[in-house]
Each structure stands twice: as C-alpha cells, then as structure tokens.
C-alpha cells in the first residue's frame, strides 16, 4: 500500500512535529493515497484527486500558512529518508509534491508571484 510507504518516524531531517503533528501526518497520508490512486493514469488527475480529497477533509490546513509549511517540511523529510534508503523515484515524488505546496503557499496563501515567473 502506497500510503504505508510514507515515513513519519525516525530522524526528523529538519521536520519538527508540532502539537498538530497528527493532523499534518494524516493530511500527508491522505494526499499520498489520493495521488497514488491515479498517478499511473495521469499526474494532473493524481494532483486533482489528492488536492480535492485533502481540501474536503482538511480545509483548515489549506488556509493556514503555518500548517502548510509543516506539510512541506514533512514531505521533504520523507524525500530525504527515501534518498537515504536508495528509493530515488519515491524521493523525487515527495520532493516534487513539497515544491507544489511551496508554490501553493506563495501564490494562494502568501499572495506572492510564483517562483517560476520570478
């Protein structure tokens, strides 16, 4: 099961869980599950599914910049852990999703211009 491949324990690699850590970890698990369900069909469909599912289940995360930064941190932690384990493809996925959330924070929450246009 893809969601079970999400790593939330061991060395934090920069991720520091907060009091709301369980919400962030559940958010990540839900996002990855939704993403993996359609990734073989289409990356766009996978992002849409994962985004829609988590927006419905965790609307408070999507509108809170501090929670979204924790999401980025946890995705980067997972990417780092997968690199250390030699699972480069999975690491790339987690890093790409972290970047997606960084851009989302900049554009929709922080009201800044996307870095790709900078």
Image (cartoon, rainbow, N blue to C red):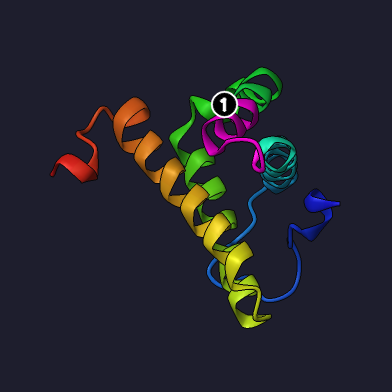
Magenta-span inclusion, residue 108: no
Taking the view exactly as shown, the residue that stands out farthest to the top is 56
> Closer to the camera, 60 or 56?
56
Q: Is residue 104 left or right of residue 96?
A: left
The residue labelled by disc 1 is 48
Q: How many marks?
A: 1
Circle 1 packing at 10 Å, graded few (<14), some (14-19), many (20+), is some
Residue 43, picture quadrant: top right
The picture places residue 57, in percent across and down from the top left corner, at: 71, 22
Decide whether the magenta segment is chiefly helix, strand or loop: helix
**Residue for point 38% across, 36% down:** 105
Question: As displayed, is residue 19 above or below residue 79?
Answer: above
Could you say whether the residue bearing mark 1 is in a helix, strand or loop? Answer: helix
> Closer to the camera, 69 or 81?
81
**Residue for point 45% across, 42% down:** 101
**Residue for point 22% across, 45% down:** 115
Q: Magenta stretch?
A: 39-51
Q: Is residue 83 left or right of residue 36?
A: left
The picture places residue 19, in percent across and down from the top left corner, at: 68, 47
Question: As displayed, is residue 82 above or below residue 37?
Answer: below
**Residue for point 59% across, 24% down:** 60
Quarter occupied by the C terminus? top left
The picture places residue 22, in percent across and down from the top left corner, at: 75, 45
Residue 47, picture quadrant: top right
């Amino acid at each position: 099961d893809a969601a079970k491949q999400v790593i939330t324990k061991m060395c934090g690699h920069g991720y520091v869980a907060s009091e709301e850590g369980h919400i962030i970890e559940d958010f990540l698990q839900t996002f990855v599950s939704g993403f993996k369900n359609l990734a073989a069909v289409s990356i766009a469909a996978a992002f849409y599914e994962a985004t829609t599912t988590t927006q419905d289940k965790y609307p408070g995360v999507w509108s809170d910049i501090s929670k979204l930064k924790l999401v980025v941190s946890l995705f980067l932690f997972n990417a780092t852990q997968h690199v250390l384990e030699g699972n480069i493809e999975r690491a790339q996925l987690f890093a790409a999703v972290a970047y997606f959330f960084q851009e989302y924070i900049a554009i929709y929450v922080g009201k800044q211009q996307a870095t790709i246009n900078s």
